[in-house]
Amino acid sequence: MSILQDVINWLLSLGAAIFVPIIIIIAGLIVGMKIKDAVSAGITLGVAFTGMSMLISFMSEAIGPAAEAMLKSTGINLPIVDGGWTTLSAIAWSWPYAFLMFPLMIGINIIMLIINKTKTFNADLWNVWGKIFTGVAVAAVCQPYFGTAGSIAVAFVTAAVQIVFELKMADMYQYRIEKLSGIPGVTCTHKMGFTSIFMFPIDCLLKKIPALNKRFDAAVLKDKIGIFAESHVLGFILGIIFGILARYGVAETLTLGIQASCSLTLFPVISKYFMMALEPISTAISAFMNKKFDDRTLVVGLDWPFMGGANEIWLAVFLCIPVTLIYSMILPGNEILPFAGIVNNAIAVAAFLVTGGNILRMCILVIIFAPAYLWVGTVMAPFISDLARSTDAVSLKAGELISCSSIDGPIQTYAFSHLFKFLDGNFFPLALCVIFVVCFIALYRYLGREEKEGREIN
């Protein structure tokens, strides 16, 4: 058992840029691709992941200090350290039972494919840590009710439920993702999309406003304001605004403007490599499934970066930064200082999916849902910090707390992990779980009709 754990941990330690391409190469060979084609597609996918990761890191390192400078100028004291998603991943993998989540995720996917309850082959096995984190949270919260053994059992059952929802979410968004990204046969299995489930009823209300129920993506914005919506110009303007808000000098402000311009300009360029890598894999898998399973379609589930070429996502990310900073200063109950998670891709991707890239509705949804990330980061800080200390995953001083200001799918994570709080008379998490299921079913049916009728996305 320890050998299996060591092997799994070593493979996952390679990172998404290596691990996911390996899975894709193996899948390509299984469905009959030539070795040279499968290897070429896998390496290209690794290049795409690495390029997108470099750009995101570059943007975060440029904007993060500016965001910190904005907060410092206010004198606000927030005690919880924001360690970002990488800290959560390290803590999750420090859970003694973490490696068991890997076969659970694969097993559920295989069973659902066999019984035809999903069309998604989830190649994003590297992000199994998201399920582990849910399990860690459930185990920590349920310990007083069920003891150690019982809480661990409940943790794996809850994680299994999350895995099923992720696969079904990937199924329902596949048509829309293909239309938005232009990449056939792929979808997203990342749990950051769960926030879109809660966004859906609000987006339905927003669409009743005529001005918001029209196509308004980056292309439309460009038609309306011309050169100011060009990626390089828009990025430069946003960078300048952040520099001014951070009270930077002229040179620093101009540098930040160019850095932001560089990021927005290169995101679409990198996204083309995802298309180059995934199109031959998708074609081969579809041909294989059509031959073996009576014209049944199979799609590949991946992490979100292949959608990173959409400027709508990055406009929402840039908006979310000052919005999150303002909320962190005025939001009752918030104790987390947003820093490592300040570039919140999770909320932007969720808004992008549910609105179909409508920039106006995305901005409204970002403003409405940004507090959820801060609140959940605050609520979960105590047990995240306890686990960090008990496993030595993160070095913390006495009394210091650590969390993340951009936890993926924060409302769902809180609801699932705190469900059994109803035993203490707290029915709020249970109510959120019910809302999640009801909204999920409604959105599943809505997107199913959209795909069946081949409707335009607005």
Image: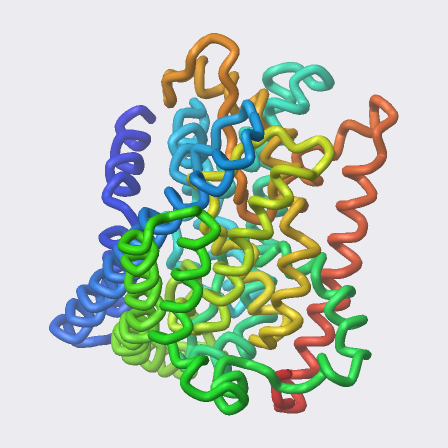
- Quarter of image, res 455: bottom right
Residue 301 horizontal side relative to residue 319, left or right: left
Query: Which is more toward the observer, 185 or 331?
Result: 331
Query: Which is more toward the observer, 136 or 341?
Result: 341
Query: Which is more toward the observer, 35 or 47?
Result: 47
Residue at 36 percent across and 68 percent down: it is: 236
Residue at the left extreme, as displayed? 36
- Quarter of image, res 209: bottom right
Q: Position of residue 318 (x, y in %)?
A: 48, 60
Residue at 71 percent across and 31 percent down: it is: 333
Q: Is residue 53 visible?
A: no
Q: Position of residue 235 (x, y in %)?
A: 39, 68
Q: Is residue 313 visible?
A: yes
Question: Which quadrant, please, contains the C terminus?
Answer: bottom right
Q: How is the image coloured?
A: rainbow
Residue at 60 percent across and 64 percent down: it is: 351
Q: Position of residue 384 (x, y in %)?
A: 53, 25
Question: Looking at the image, how many numbered discs can be counted on the residues?
Answer: 0
Residue 332 horizontal side relative to residue 12, left or right: right
Residue 96 horizontal side relative to residue 134, left or right: left
Query: Which is more toward the observer, 135 or 208?
Result: 208
Question: Which quadrant, please, contains the N terminus?
Answer: top left
In this rendering, the answer to whether 307 lies above or below 379 is: below
Residue at 35 percent across and 77 percent down: it is: 282
Residue at the right extreme, as displayed? 425
- Quarter of image, res 280: bottom left
In this rendering, the answer to whether 322 lies above or below 386 is: below
Residue at the top extreme, as displayed? 398
Residue 130 horizontal side relative to residue 13, left or right: right
Q: Position of residue 238 (x, y in %)?
A: 44, 64
